[in-house]
Amino acid sequence: MPAFLAAIEVHLKPGALDPQGQAVGKGLRALGHAGVTDVRVGKHLRVRLEAADAAAARAEVERMCRELLANPVMETFSFDVVAAS
């Protein structure tokens, strides 16, 4: 069965509180990066999986995101799937 690599990005929805992003922004400004006005923190995941074809791999990754990797109430996700070398 062919192998695929999925690069998944999970981000908080606009308007959702992001205490981690606020802390990073505060730290950057404290280090002299005065132009930083907003920081949002998300997750980047890389998943290697086997599937019959690229369409099946994409469907499987979407299911992973909906079932576990992203909270649909407060997060959005996007992903890209490529054949593994």
Image (tube, rainbow, N blue to C red):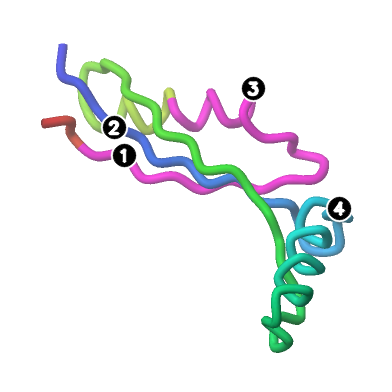
At label 3, the amino acid type is Glu
Q: Earlier in the sequence, mark 2 or mark 3?
A: 2
**Mark 4 residue crowding within 10 angstroms, few (<14) / some (14–19) / many (20+):** few
At label 2, the amino acid type is Leu
Name the residue beneath numbered marker 1: 81
Secondary structure found at label 2:
strand
Q: Earlier in the sequence, mark 4 or mark 3?
A: 4
**Mark 3 residue crowding within 10 angstroms, few (<14) / some (14–19) / many (20+):** few
Q: Are marks 2 and 3 in contact (CB under 8 Å)?
A: no
At label 1, the amino acid type is Val
Name the residue beneath numbered marker 4: 19
**The C terminus lies in quadrant:** top left
Q: Are marks 2 and 4 in contact (CB under 8 Å)?
A: no
On residue 73, which mark appears? none
Marks 2, 4: nearer the viewer: 4
Q: Is residue 72 magenta?
A: yes
Disc 4 to disc 1, how far (Cα)? 30 Å
Name the residue beneath numbered marker 3: 67
Disc 4 to disc 3, how far (Cα)? 24 Å
- State left or right for residue 17 relative to residue 50: right
Marks 2, 1: nearer the viewer: 2
Q: At which x and y percent is residue 83? A: 18, 34
Please name the residue shown 73% across and 86% down the image: 34
Please name the residue shown 88% across and 55% down the image: 17
